[in-house]
Amino acid sequence: MINEPVKREGDDFFISMIRLKTYSLLSVALLISSGPLIAANIPAITKEFPKVNPIHVGLLTTIPSLFIILGVLIANRVELWIGKKKTILIGLGLVFLAGVFPVLKHDIFSLLFLSRCFFGLGIGLFNRLIIQMISDIFQDDPHRKATVIGLESAFEGLGGICLTFLVGQLLKINWYTSFLIYALALPIFLGFIFFVPDDKKKMGKRKAETNKTISESLNRMGSYRSVIGYSILLFVIVTIFINYNIQVTPLILEKSIGDATIGSNNLAFIGLGAFIAGFSFGRIFQLLKGYIMPVSLLLLGISIYITTISDSILLTTFCSMAIGFSFRCIMPYLIHTFTQQSEKMARIGTTMVLVAYNIGATLSPYEEKLFSKLLQVNNVQSLFIANSIIILLISIIGLGVVFTKGKTSQTQQRSI
């Protein structure tokens, strides 16, 4: 009789604890993109405060992005004093308190505005560190780490989709009750306390094989020049991507192929594409490796261009999903690549990526004005054509660079 492997009683418990740890980490990402979700409240808030400049009311959706940048920079120092886990918990606490504050006190605009500033600061405190903790915990399994980083991106998109729906439902009561969505930070806070281990110094120790991988990766992306170059590139990509989110509904109306509701549905499909990309990133990374970024940019550029010539709402919606998919392949790739390096370079790289992302998101509305003046265009279709050409040129250059590096690496290996 063949002896079958005996399943130990503690195995199921051990697996369950690993899953709880992973999902407690990932649940934090549900809040990362939650800042702009209250945009639907702006008309009601404007009526509530008729003496306040409407521009200042509109800042309630964008001011968190600026304070996210400040939070990311502050987190680098705070982390050194109290560790990653405690810094993340402080950020979650700020998001909870500042997020739900308008529910309790909503008749003074200055306090409402201040609460949004602290809300952005809270997100900034854990935005980078959650990625770094994933990198630390799964350092010995690069494929698993790439998968979890992709899932982090997926959870970020999932949070945007689900919380947007909840805001719409709460908004039926009144504008300030919609801020109750940020109460989600409380169970996430508790789950993080109980199921995510403390970050310890021993986590920073590398094996010889890991050090070898790091030194090789430093030759590719380890210099400060590369970090700055990728940050500038990401700034351009984010600016164009966010601008698409803002202008896709005006494009649909301009071409008379749909109404505002259909435009809103396109935004949902952008989120769906991003969600799919996050869940499949591990497999995509295995398949494409260094070609992920140029191939994703190629898909992004082609999809934007097709929307300019499409007269079918079905095709435009599919392109929106492809745009969300391609963009969410780029972000996890950059983050995963930087986290493969030394702890210092990983911190600098991920910080620069997140700063570039938030600056690009904040300044994206001004891209339309800049291009309108430079190119003398006055419609969304022309703007999208210009954006698609820029992305396609970057993707072609990127394909050439990756191909050349691959050939050079093969030649060096043969000579050795």
Image (spheres, rainbow, N blue to C red):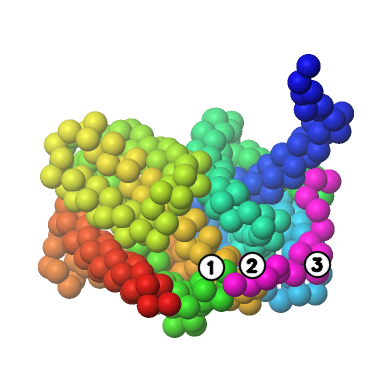
Q: Is residue 357 left or right of residue 403?
A: right
Task: Mark 3: give few (<14), some (14-19) or many (20+) Cα within 10 Å.
Answer: few
Q: Secondary structure at mark 3?
A: helix
Q: Secondary structure at mark 1?
A: helix
The image quadrant of residue 21 is top right
In the image, residue 98 sits, relative to residue 250, either above or below, namely: below
Label 3: which residue? Answer: 202
Label 1: which residue? Answer: 338
In the image, residue 115 sits, relative to residue 250, either above or below, namely: below
Q: Image point 61% across, 63% down: which residue? A: 128
Q: Position of residue 142 (x, y in %)?
A: 59, 56
The image quadrant of residue 291 is bottom left
Label 2: which residue? Answer: 209
Say which of 306 and 94 sits in front. Answer: 306
Chain-order first, disc 2 or disc 3: 3
Say which of 160 and 401 sits in front. Answer: 401
Bounds of the magenta segment: 194-212
